[in-house]
Image: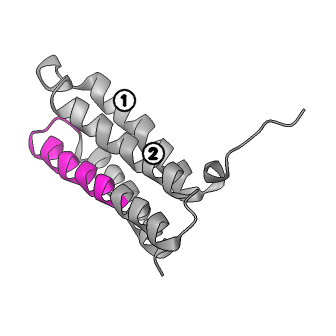
Amino acid sequence: MEEFRFDFENLKVYQKALCLINKVFKIIKELPKEYRYSIGDNLLRASLSIANNIAEGNDKKSLKEKLRYFRISSDSARECASVFIVLNQQKLITKEIFQELRKDVREITSMLKGFSK
């Protein structure tokens, strides 16, 4: 029997969002405890919002409604970028990880913007 897959699971942008979430989990686990529940929680919610809004929006019938969810997803990706900047400035992540995460967020936001064209 073939495994069932939702349509959004085939979207490259959704798969990239899942990869970003995995990276966020690793970062949170390495944060000092005093930041794990403030910055870490905010970052996790924002990264999950990227994937969740892609999944939810992909099933909307009207293009206007679909694009609204994709914009929310893009906003959440930008929220992650802001947190990554703070983590980098505070030396809580390495410059290499910071650059990799920025690249990931840029790719996700570019792909989401592509849906609106």
Q: Where 100 falls versus 22 (above or below)?
A: below
User: Where, quadrant-wise, is the N terminus in this rendering?
Assistant: top right
Indicate which disc, 2 or 1, sits on the residue closer to the N terminus: 1
Relative image position of residue 85 (x, y in whole percent):
17, 50
Q: Where 111 falls versus 46 (above or below)?
A: below
- Label placed on residue 39: none
**Can you name the residue that lies furthest to the bottom here?**
117
Magenta span has 80?
A: yes
Which residues lie in the magenta part? 74-93
Residue 13 is left or right of residue 80, and the answer is: right
Mark 2 residue type? Asn
Residue 10 is left or right of residue 3, and the answer is: left
Magenta stretch secondary structure, dominant: helix
Relative image position of residue 4 (x, y in whole percent):
76, 39
The crowding category of the residue bearing disc 2, from other C-alpha atoms within 10 Å (few below 14, some 14 to 19, many at least 20), is many
Q: Quadrant of residue 3?
A: top right
Q: Which residue is painted at 23% across and 31% down in the image?
A: 40
Residue 35 is left or right of residue 41, and the answer is: left
The crowding category of the residue bearing disc 1, from other C-alpha atoms within 10 Å (few below 14, some 14 to 19, many at least 20), is few
Of badges 2 and 1, the one in the foreground is 2
- Label placed on residue 52: 2
**Can you name the residue that lies furthest to the top here?**
33
Question: Which residue has dot 1 on it?
Answer: 26
